[in-house]
Image (cartoon, rainbow, N blue to C red):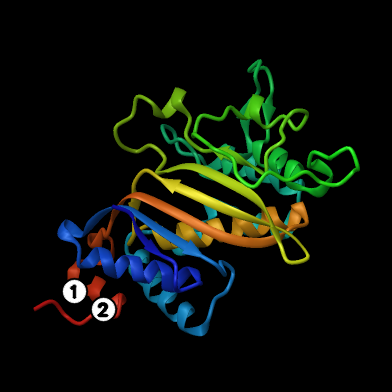
Amino acid sequence: MAILFDDKERVVPTWLAAAKHLESSPGRKAMNIVLEIAEPLAVTAEDKALMQRVDDALMAKDLTLRTVAGTIFPLDLYRRYGRPGFYEKYKAMLKRGKKAGTWGTYALRMIDRASKDCANSINPLDMLIKRLRDDGQPKKQNGQISSFTSAYELGVSDPAIDSDASYANGVGGEVPTYNAAIDGREWMGMPCLSHLSFKRVETDGGYAVNLTAMYRSHHYCARALGNLLGLAQLLSFVAKEAELKVGTLTCLSSHAVLDVDMWGGVKQARTILGLPPSK
């Protein structure tokens, strides 16, 4: 049975509620944790204090929230070079720094995929942005935008074909991060983020873009908070470039784990989460 966390509105308290639930779950594991975040860009002083506690614990494992978030969206490069300039800068940076035998980053897979003929590359994320814009939407005969309320999806999209704006007529689109040719034979070490789905939704006085992310496996100490921050930054980027409002961020952790060893053990994890010591 899925468990929904949707009453905290911001990223940090929503993640915290789910992490506390995992701490009290058998084996500190659960299936189908759903996080729905109405204000994904909102951060309070209390949120920042908790983020710092998580960062302090992760640094012992050579991780930070910023580096985890950056695997989903390279915010610093975008701020410096803008769109489309940061795309090539990021690809060049990854080409220099990518370790042998690793699959890269989610951000790289979103912006650099082989085309249908495998002779060139395409940028699925930028194609999606263009389709989400008003001028990328299908029009009725009277010139008004035609908007579909829902679309039924499977994570089988081929960006070389399905991102072609010439025939797309849905309300959103998908950015695949799972590559069967590379990941399909692996048992471990493959990407945990399986699928991203954006939706263009009507709001008061305009349109917003929502983002739904699906994780096949999600580690709530090492990765989940940084992932959510990166997804919020990605959503903000897409909304800005598509000239839409920032909508809701939804995350499905199909297999969620509170990996307390990443924070130094149970005692340290409970302290970070604001829980009393175990009896």
Mark 1 neighbour class, 10 Å CA radius: few under 14, some 14 to 19, many 20 or more = some
Question: Up-down: is 60 above or below 50?
Answer: above
The amino acid type of the residue labelled 2 equals Thr
Along the viewing direction, whichever of 156 and 269 lies nearer the viewer: 156
Q: Position of residue 126 (x, y in %)?
A: 71, 41
How far apart marks 2 and 1 lie (CA) works out to 6 Å
Question: Which quadrant, please, contains the C terminus?
Answer: bottom left
Task: State the mark number for residue 83.
Answer: none
Question: Up-down: is 278 above or below 66?
Answer: below
Task: State the mark number for residue 271.
Answer: 2
Question: Up-down: is 20 above or below 233?
Answer: below
Q: Does residue 68 show up?
A: no
Mark 2 neighbour class, 10 Å CA radius: few under 14, some 14 to 19, many 20 or more = few
Q: In percent of the image, x 45 and y 26: which residue is there?
A: 180
Give the residue at the far left of this rendering. 279
The amino acid type of the residue labelled 1 equals Lys
